[in-house]
Amino acid sequence: MANIRSVKGMVGLVTGGASGLGRATVERLLSQGASAVILDLPSSDGHKVAAALGDRCAFAPTDVTSESDVRSAVDLAKQKYGKVDLAVNCAGIAVAVKTYNFKKDLPHSLEDFTRVITVNIAGTFNVIRLAVGEMGKNEPDADGHRGCIINTASVAAYDGQVGQAAYSASKGGIVGMTLPIARDLAPMGIRVVTIAPGSISVERRLETGADVLSGDVHQHSGQNLYSHIPFHLPASVFQLEMEHLGPLIPSK
């Protein structure tokens, strides 16, 4: 097993942190001595979750595609906890729609496709670009590290299923931008990695790590889409996240 760097005393931003994998990540960060700011929509349970988790957790109502919202969340972390060390991007949306519905003579909505791309790719990039400004102000540790970004893609980036054109494209975009961003930030000691889990078992239900907005594909709680892929518990995904807090890749 890879060495796992301690997160004790670190401060993390977690998008989508009010539920699912995001909430599980927040809870594990807190259990290991870190502080966390939940970035989630105003309509989420973010306030309730943060209040229940104690003083080392705060909520910042955030649309990840909004520059002002994300700046406010970064500012909250700095004001309340003094710094930003980590950003874990768990927020995401999906539609389960075929490219063309021949029974209804209806093409996939371009609006829905664009929305998924915007939230999942641009929203992730928006958080990265604004969080790393604060990370760059941190004093490097003994290994030269100043911070870490962990993005959540999906097995769908590599093995998309029926009705997942938009979702797979968005997760493939996250995978594609990871290496150039990592190379951009490596000289500052900021590590950037992306994990690509399959479906995740959360609160006795199965999810792909994204909120499904609409769809014409019956997924049987995800079983048909990923019947050949093991399901993961949030704790195992968090373990994978923490294993990536290792040595920096070299910039080129």
Image (cartoon, helix red, strand yellow):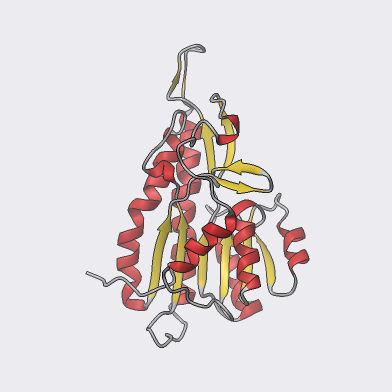
Instruction: Give coordinates of residue 109: x percent, y percent.
Output: 49, 27
Q: Which is more toward the observer, 45 or 242?
A: 242
Q: Which residue shows up at 58% across the image and 62% down it?
A: 14
x, y percentage for residue 198?
A: 48, 46
Which residue does the image show at 50% across and 40% down from the upper left?
115
Is residue 218 or residue 166 the one in the foreground? 218
Indicate the quadrant where residue 53 lies: bottom right
Q: Is residue 140 left or right of residue 234?
A: left
Q: Is residue 198 above or below residue 106?
A: below
| Residue at the spot 49% in from the left edge and 75% down from the top edge | 134
> In terms of image quadrants, where is residue 204?
top right
Q: Residue at x 34, y 73 (%)?
A: 248
Which is nearer the eye, 40 or 171?
171
Q: Position of residue 131 (x, y in %)?
A: 49, 68
Which quarter of the rendering shows the C terminus?
Answer: bottom left
Say which quarter of the image contains residue 205.
top right
Q: Decide if residue 76 is in sight here.
A: no
Q: Is residue 157 left or right of residue 252?
A: right
Rendered view: 74 above or below 122 = below
The residue most toward the left is 252
Residue 180 in picture, x, y percent from top left? 30, 61
Side (left or right) of 36 relative to 2 = right
Left or right of residue 25, residue 105 in this image:
left
The answer to whether residue 124 of the structure is visible from this angle is yes
